[in-house]
Amino acid sequence: MGESVAEATITNWLKQVGDKIEADEAVLEIATDKVDSEVPSEVSGILVEQLFGKDDLVQVGQTIAIIETDSAAVTETVQEVAAPAEVAIIEKTVEVAKEAVAVPADFSDSEKFLSPLVKNIAKEEGVSVAELAAISGTGKEGRVTKNDILEYVKNRTSQPVVAAPVQKTVAAPVAQKAAPVSVSGGDEIIEMDRMRKLIAGYMVASVQTSAHVQSFIEVDVTNIVKWREKNKVTFEKREGEKLTYTPIFMEAVAKALKDFPGMNISVDGDYIIKKKNINLGMAASLPNGNLIVPVIKNADQLNLVGMAKAVNDLGGRAKAGKLKPDDTQGGTYTVTNVGTFGSVFGTPIINQPQVGILALGAIRKMPAVIETPEGDFIGIRQKMFLSHSYDHRVVDGALGGSFVKRVAEYLEAFDVNRDV
């Protein structure tokens, strides 16, 4: 899933035990904190075991399923060793059957969350509910992991150790906010989807974490508008890519970040981490109305053509739901285009753990004072606002204001005679 992704949640198994699977066929769906994606099989075969269930959190590198790739060879091997092993297999079967009778197959009485894999191991090894309650889990929120129960089985004595009965107390019910009810009966009640819940959590956490301060600056982008109008058709014919304003703005932001590396940082507790690479996040809206931020890696190393291709690629895959988990990781600074929806400027919320985010306002024709050697006069110019939100814990007004001013200077100095 990419170097920067450490874990994912299984959201759905597309194949069940016993199903035939072709190479590159999707086996299950997973979700990271930002992207949902499918996991394809690397081989053809039959799914013989699922090691994790739906909603289980899985670390990168863990085995999640077993696929039998050559059933004929497996059957032949079993037949060859059947004679010396038959007795052991039968004994094991009887032993498991006895344990299944002695140990409840239903672990619903356990107060701990138990994954299907842990339950299966417990049943096979004759570990009771009481014993499971006594195991100290090393997983998230104290969950018992596969390694925990295997280690317990390995070290326990031949006679199972049964924990002393624990007097159960009836806990007070957790106060949960009930779903709202339409008084008039005409209102539609819709529960947030998973991604919207995550976005809501991130936004609230960011406001609670960072001291948000904003700086606004007006920019004359007349030269950029003229240049794009003159070259967009030629660019699309030659490169097969549409030429939008976004890559031009991204190029200016990347240059300004090189000039002001103090904006290309993150905060971890009491420590400031200066980022070596300039990775620009690009806020993009999804068809369902949610927002995602794919990242252009090493943006300062791209020319305008490379930047346009990266912007179009990430934007297109975001709309099609084809982003990979690593596409949204590693950003060091974020740009959002609020002008797409007609907003003149905005006050965007910082994408943690970054310390700044720039909002691009709508480009509008405005009357402006134009200074010339012959004197000042009023003319029609193409103008827009840049809105810079930054973390006042580590970025003071001088740095935050100077950075956005430098972006404006790069945009206003754009060469109208520049080659495509």
Image (spheres, rainbow, N blue to C red):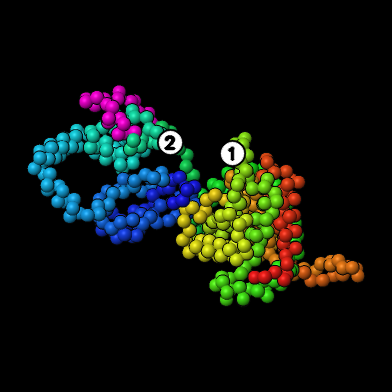
Q: Are marks 2 and 1 in contact (CB under 8 Å)?
A: no
Q: Name the side, left or right, on which 54 lies relative to 329.
A: left
Our reading of the magenta stretch's main secondary structure is: loop
Kindly identify which residue carries mark 1: 268
* Within-10-Å neighbours for mark 2: few <14, some 14–19, many 20+: few
> With respect to residue 178, does 241 lie above or below?
below
- Residue 177 in percent (x, y) is at 49, 44
Left of 370 or right of it: where is 143? left
Query: Is residue 161 shown in magenta?
Result: yes
Task: Tell me the residue at 69%/44% (across/down).
Answer: 395
Rendered location of residue 348, percent (x, y): 64, 53
The structure residue drawn at horizontal position 33% and vertical position 25%, both measured from the top left corner, is 166
- Considering the image in quadrants, where does the C terminus appear? bottom right
Element at label 1: strand
The answer to which of marks 2 and 1 sits earlier in the sequence is 2
Q: Amino acid at mark 1?
A: Asp
Q: Is residue 375 visible?
A: yes
Three-letter amino acid code at the position of disc 2: Glu
Residue under the image location 17 percent in, 55 percent down: 72
Q: Which label was assigned to residue 141?
A: 2
Marks 2 and 1, how far apart at CA? 22 Å
Query: In the picture provided, is 49 more to the left or to the right than 37?
Result: left
